[in-house]
Image (cartoon, rainbow, N blue to C red):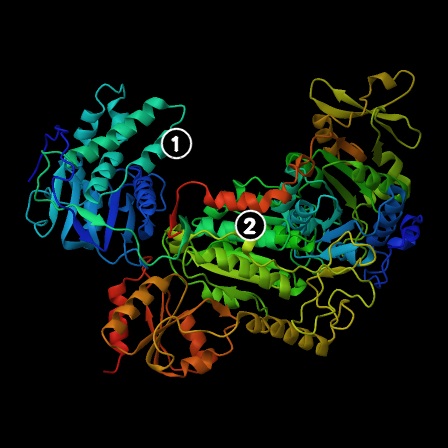
Amino acid sequence: MDHSVLSAPLTAKDFASDEEVRWCPGCGDYAILKSMQKALVKIGARPETTVFVSGIGCASRFPYYMNTYGFHTIHGRAPAIATGAKLANPDLDIWVITGDGDGLSIGGNHLLHVLRRNIDLQVLLFNNEIYGLTKGQSSPTSRLGTRSPSTPNGSIESPVSPLIFALGSGANFVARAVDVSQVSLQVTLERAHAYKGAAFVEIFQNCIVYNDGVFNDFTERNLSSDRQIHVQHGQPLIYGKNKDIGLKLDHKTLCLESVKLGRGESKESDLIIHDERNRMLAVMLASMRPPDLPMALGVILCDPVDSISKAAPSNRRDSWTDDLNKLMRAGHTWTVGT
Amino acid sequence: MSRSSLISVECNENAQQRKQVSSAVVRFAGDSGDGMQLTGGQFTLSTATQQNNLLTFPDFPAEIRAPIGTTFGVSSFQINFGSREIRTAGDRLDCLVAMNPAALKVEIGKLKPGGVLIVDTGAFSERNYKRAGYKNNPLEGDSLNQFTVINLDISAATIAALKGHNLSKKESLRCKNLWALGLTYYLYGRDRDPTVKWLRQKFSGRNDLAAANIAVLHAGYKVADSSEFPTQFTTFQVGPADEMAAGVYRAVTGSDALAWGLSAGSHLADLKMIFASYPITPASPLLHSLASMEVDDIVTFQAEDEIAAICAAIGASYAGSLGVTSSSGPGISLKTEGLGLAVSAELPLIVVNSQRSGPSTGMPTKTEQSDLFQALFGRSSDSPVVVLAPFSPGDCFTIAIEAIRIAISYMTPVIILTDTFIANASEPWLIPDVNKLDPIEVKFCSTTEGFHPYRRGTERLDRPWVKPGTPGLEHRIGGLERDYDSGKISYEPDNHHKMTVTRYNKVKCVRDYIGPQTVTRGPQSGKVAVVGWGSTYGPISRAVDNLLQRGMDVSHIHLRNLWPLPKNLKQLLANYETVLVIEANLGQLLFLIKGYCLIDAKGFNKVSGQPFMISEVEEAIIDVYRF
């Protein structure tokens, strides 16, 4: 093994595989891929101990394009496969890549359980609110009225909120980012990686073919400042082009309200200070929807607790043959002959 | 015949001569809450320590506590034990213990004429016998005249024995199974000590309950051993088994043997085992056995569903451990998608199917062999896997190790098809020394030169097993078809054909490992070959032995390898005029043999949830025999 090669600093290119990327031109996945490669460099990840596990769908092709270990598995099952891999080798650094159909429809049960078990891995859910690879059917996150080949008159089902689902499943790290917001996405990925346990990140990902512009109401350049809030632990919840809008709790309704800061209006001291460990606040932040309230981005909940893989018992391999021999001879035995 | 005042406990041990018998079949039957499985288990323990050969058959309903006194709530435990080799749980009963009218109604048809019937008269109230479907008290008519009936008010005797024990009537009555056990111990000259020790251990911390149960056990025994007991009842002596190889033995169920075999196999391969499963009858005891081991190298994982269980096992194998999953037919249905991925990704994987009666929920606690087609063909596309079937509880240990060896050597999923009977039945087992078993070679790939994830070995067509964490071998695999020469995604038509053929041939190569099919008993060619697989081994082998002794030209061929089939099978079966395939389904192995060996074999099939009887197998053979 050439240690000088091993210890050489890596660049984003070192994490790019030689496989030709097959996403549609202009797909949000390209931006996520780039942020991930940069984040891994920043983290100091090693290609040999990094594993990407995915299910089925456009997002799930992600592992092929990373020069790390990768397992492109079956629809919805990536969290279960990643759980097995992590139980087998807790030293692996595992990223689960899923989409809104893969993670919340066919694989909803597995996502629920990997989060409640707090397996030490990162789950990135690329949410484009549509089925891409099967040509544009409505997904569990599609908004009411979404017209698609399977819902020609508009979807009549209420969409699921990935973050509320994750919080309800008992996730202790929940974050959100936008595909093309490279800097904040990269920082969010780094934070998710640093968390010991199951880290859940919803990434708003634009599908240029089947659902183009579905997030424009808060990602358009002229709207984003007034309709996004990037939460920071310990900082007051302030947003807006001029940093003059804040979030405050209405004590009578127990609802968040958006208030204008300034003379004769609300003061900064009236605002909520973001506390990553406050689950109730996380639920309120995750529930916000533009235009009345901004879309919350960044680390919404980060409440460290022990992960299963951290609590593994000590290894007893050396004596195992004798232990097994003893076990099989425990209880009532008898001897025939001499 | 009715006796209600058995209170004298004067002992008259050896007052009567015991009748020597070479084997006996005893069945305990009662309500599902009566502790019949415990009673049978204790009788087995005592019998095993007396060095009898034995085979047991727990037969119970799926309901945990069915309504009291109903026929569908009857829970039974049968044991066949003897000084001769025992291969089945016994066709007909020598002794039936019926704790209530429902048990009598369900089980009396199995008792031999002249057999011993022990009934608790205390449970035969009008309400109870009507609930069981009797119009009149069955103990009062002449319907039981052909049997030796021991009518005892076991309920009353139990309460009497517990006078001064400070237990309520309800608590006292819970001990009545031990009274019946004590009586049965006396009838068959069994030792009470193992049960006394077991009770002390079970109720450690509750000395009052231990003392009560032990007192009742002794009371049942002593009543039979007293001058009050009618002397016309024969007692029996069953000597130690004389055909067993030297060594240390224990009684083992298929579930325990499988758990230990999987543990031994993963240890021989020097691999951590990840056992992932979802609770299902009758497969759960395997999860329980492994979970109780508390060794870091054996990780048990109760998954959220059957799909997650096989997926976690696949993930474990991908990461360089041994992935194992277990279920029963309906659960295996859910695992077929995962199995397809394991076939495509070519990873070692063990899938245990403890078959039960189906389809769908079927009869969860009853045995069947009807998942053979599912194991062989139950996946999308051409996706061959190796299929093995143990023939007895003890064989589960051996077959688990073989399955692991094959899975690792050939980088393939292996299905172990066991069944409810084998999982629950127990038999004496010569305990192996794990130190003396051959290690299983595991070669994780470490060379980067010319590496790609589907570069195959020439002999077994196996692809390299790479442990993530190995520098320089980073690669991507998955369910998409890949190029034979580079391992990269490929939709090229000729390549897909080549890969499909290669996957098929790889599994076919396993024939070289398993070797030729042998004849279990009887001549190598002749009139009739009886072919079986799995738990039919006992009844077929005994039936064939019986017919051989009668001078008939019959052989028994038992398959442990169901896919790939042994190379010589076609040639071997062609040596017989008639091939008779006996199985607990509607002819699945028969279909395979007809198609694969092009032999016009005949079938004998029974799908009742019950094991085959020796007598019905004998009749089936005689039916096809050309005298």
Residue at position x 10%, y 41% in the image: B137
Residue B188, horizontal then vertical, whole percent: 22, 45
Q: Position of residue B134 (x, y in %)?
A: 14, 45
Residue situated furthest front in the rendering: A338
> Residue tagged by mark 1?
B202
Q: How many marks?
A: 2
Image-quadrant location for residue B232: top left
Asked if residue A76 can be seen in this view, the reply is no
Q: Nearer the viewer, residue B461 or B122?
A: B461
**Decide: marks 1, 2 in contact (CB < 8 A)?**
no
Q: Residue at x 57, y 69 (%)?
A: B384
Amino acid carrying mark 2 in the image: Ser
Residue beneath disc 2: B263
> Which circle's residue, 1 or 2, is located before the other in the chain?
1
Bin the neighbour count of mark 2 within 10 Å (Cα to Cα): few under 14, some 14-19, many 20 and up: many
Q: Nearer the viewer, residue B586 or B183?
A: B183
Q: Residue at x 90, y 26 (%)?
A: A244
- Separation (CA) of disc 1 from disc 2: 27 Å
The disc numbered 2 marks a residue on which chain? B
Q: Quadrant of the N terminus of chain A?
A: bottom right
Q: Residues within 10 Å of mark 1 (few under 14, many from 20)?
A: few
Towards the viewer: B130 or B482: B482
Query: Callout 1, which amino acid?
Result: Lys
| Residue B565 placement, left or right of A63 | left
**In the displayed structure, would residue A174 be above or below residue B384?**
above
On screen, residue B569 above or below B361: below
Task: Name the secondary structure under disc 1.
Answer: helix
> Left or right: where does residue A81 sit relative to residue B309?
right
